[in-house]
Image (spheres, helix red, strand yellow):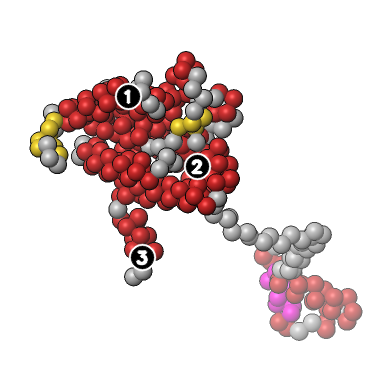
């Protein structure tokens, strides 16, 4: 089995987390190569896929609220996000389904993008946003909201509660807001807020991830080829011939009578045989 077949097998059998990592890496790496060897092409693509905080741009490119989350600033940005994605998804799917994880991931990324463009109306930084951090924060904070007292072992630190880890990450974003990457940290906080709201709504019976499932099902149905109805050829007689009614056959007795009468008219009564005379006599008697 070559490496391509091995990757295909891992993609099919690895679950939704593995597939999302494949998508992120599979999109990011070609962009890194383009940036190094074809910067003009890179700039053109990044302008169409990254999320701009300028309203005149994101309003005419609404797809960027989703596509930006599959782009990354550099190799280490990608590596760190994929490690946290793998970690946070395993925590979340301890309690929830893959569909709920995928729905939260996509909606969390979209909401993080909305927070980014709304807050930049005040900061006026005119920047672009890339990276899956907002979507990943939604998943991590969602797990911490649902089960804050769950414990995990971290390298060099030991056992910590999930809410402790979530609090540290939120504080790091808050501390770095005025220092650098303000829009990025605001997107992280937007994703975290969505993860918290998602779990609270879910506990009250509202599963927002069904929105994603319904949209996906709609497009799958829309583009699924319809089964062709088998064509039945019908032959139609344009000038149908009128049906001829079969002539009713004469009654056998009446036919015999006619033949005898015809014989009488030609040869006289005396020409009849004995049987013919008895037949006429019997018929006349019955009538």
Position of 267 relative to 23 (above/below): below
Around disc 3, counting alpha carbons within 10 Å, would you say few (fewer than 14), some (14 to 19), or many (20 or more)? few
Magenta span dominant secondary structure? helix
Classify mark 2: helix, strand or loop.
helix
Name the residue: 55% across, 41% down: 43
Numbered disc total: 3
- What are the residue bounds of the magenta stretch? 276-283
Residue 80's spot in the image, x, y percent? 30, 41
* Foreground pick, 116 / 251: 116
Name the residue: 38% across, 26% down: 180
Position of 174 relative to 231 (above/below): above
Reply yes or no: does residue 41 show up in magenta.
Answer: no
Which labelled disc corresponds to residue 219? Answer: 2
* Foreground pick, 215 / 74: 74
Q: Residue furthest top?
A: 122
Spatial CA distance of label 1 from label 3 is 41 Å
Which labelled disc corresponds to residue 3? Answer: 3
């Amino acid at each position: 089995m070559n490496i391509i077949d091995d990757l295909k097998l891992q993609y099919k059998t690895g679950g939704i987390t593995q597939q999302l990592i494949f998508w992120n890496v599979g999109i990011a790496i070609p962009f890194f190569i383009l940036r190094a060897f074809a910067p003009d092409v890179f700039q053109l693509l990044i302008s169409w896929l990254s999320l701009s905080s300028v309203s005149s741009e994101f309003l005419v490119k609404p797809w960027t609220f989703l596509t930006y989350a599959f782009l990354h600033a550099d190799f280490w940005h990608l590596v760190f996000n994929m490690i946290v994605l793998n970690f946070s998804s395993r925590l979340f799917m301890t309690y929830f389904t893959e569909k709920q994880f995928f729905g939260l991931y996509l909606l969390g990324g979209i909401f993080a993008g909305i927070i980014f463009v709304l807050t930049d109306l005040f900061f006026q930084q005119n920047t672009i946003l890339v990276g899956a951090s907002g979507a990943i924060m939604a998943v991590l904070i969602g797990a911490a909201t649902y089960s804050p007292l769950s414990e995990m072992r971290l390298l060099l630190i030991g056992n910590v509660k999930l809410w402790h880890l979530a609090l540290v990450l939120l504080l790091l974003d808050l501390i770095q807001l005025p220092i650098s990457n303000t829009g990025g940290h605001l997107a992280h906080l937007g994703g975290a807020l969505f993860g918290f709201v998602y779990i609270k709504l879910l506990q009250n019976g509202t599963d927002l991830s069904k929105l994603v499932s319904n949209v996906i099902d709609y497009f799958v149905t829309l583009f699924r080829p319809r089964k062709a109805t088998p064509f039945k050829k019908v032959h139609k007689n344009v000038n149908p011939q009128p049906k001829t009614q079969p002539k009713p056959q004469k009654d056998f007795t009446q036919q015999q009578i006619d033949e005898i009468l015809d014989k009488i008219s030609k040869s006289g009564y005396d020409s009849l045989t004995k049987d013919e005379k008895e037949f006429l006599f019997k018929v006349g008697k019955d009538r």
